[in-house]
């Protein structure tokens, strides 16, 4: 009989545990879900703001670098008294040589020499320009 009594007590305890009424509803879990949602949204918002600022600074830095390059080629063109057509041709040559910037052509005479060899049609313009920019350092030998 004791086993049947213990089964009845277990059944009563189990059914009482399953039927929690409104007065017994715990309040902590109901506040936990909104708190976790709020923390998640705050973390996502902070990450979005940080990411936006990061990419804005990278974009601004890229624009500044491009502006510096344009100003540098303009200053070098003024120092060497290059015309707008000369600068346009140098930029075209830089594009043909896959250079990141036409300023490289004003720094290294070998680049102009190499292009004069690759493009004989432009050699009539490149050779005098190379001698004007680099003097004796420009050593292009015309092919016979």
Image (cartoon, helix red, strand yellow):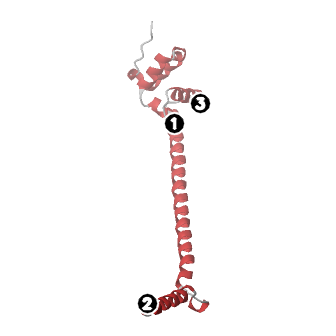
Above or below 39: residue 47: above
Residue 79 x, y percent position in the rendering: 49, 34
The residue depicted at 44 percent of the width and 25 percent of the height is 111
CB contact under 8 Å: marks 2 and 3:
no
Q: Nearer the viewer, residue 43 or 111?
A: 43
Look at 50% across and 39% down and name the residue there. Answer: 72
Earlier in the chain: of badge 3 and badge 1, it is 1
- Mark 2 or mark 3: whose residue is earlier in sequence: 2
- Quadrant, the C terminus: top left
- Is residue 111 found left or right of 62 in the rendered image? left
Q: Mark yes or no: residue 37 visible.
A: yes
Name the residue at 48% across, 31% down.
99
Q: Which residue is mark 2?
A: 3
Residue 84 disc label = 3
**Disc 1: which residue:** 73
State how many labels appear: 3
Reply above or below: 126 against 105: above
Q: Residue 143: which numbered mark, if any? A: none
Tag 2 secondary structure: helix
| Dot 2 alpha-carbon crowd within 10 angstroms: few under 14, some 14 to 19, many 20 or more | few
How far, Cα to Cα, is label 2 from label 1? 99 Å
Judging depth in this view, the residue of 135 and 64 nearest the camera is: 64
The CA span between labels 2 and 3 is 106 Å
């Amino acid at each position: 009989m004791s086993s049947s009594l213990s089964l009845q007590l277990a059944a009563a305890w189990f059914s009482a545990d399953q039927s929690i009424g409104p007065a017994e509803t715990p309040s902590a879990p109901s506040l936990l879900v909104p708190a976790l949602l709020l923390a998640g949204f705050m973390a996502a918002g902070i990450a979005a703001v940080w990411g936006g600022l990061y990419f804005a600074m990278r974009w601004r830095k890229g624009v500044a670098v491009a502006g510096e390059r344009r100003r540098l080629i303009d200053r070098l063109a003024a120092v060497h008294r290059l015309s707008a057509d000369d600068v346009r041709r140098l930029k075209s040559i830089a594009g043909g040589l896959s250079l990141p910037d036409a300023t490289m052509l004003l720094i290294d005479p070998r680049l102009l020499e190499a292009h004069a060899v690759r493009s004989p049609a432009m050699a009539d313009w490149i050779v005098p320009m190379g001698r004007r920019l680099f003097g004796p350092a420009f050593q292009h030998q015309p092919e016979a």
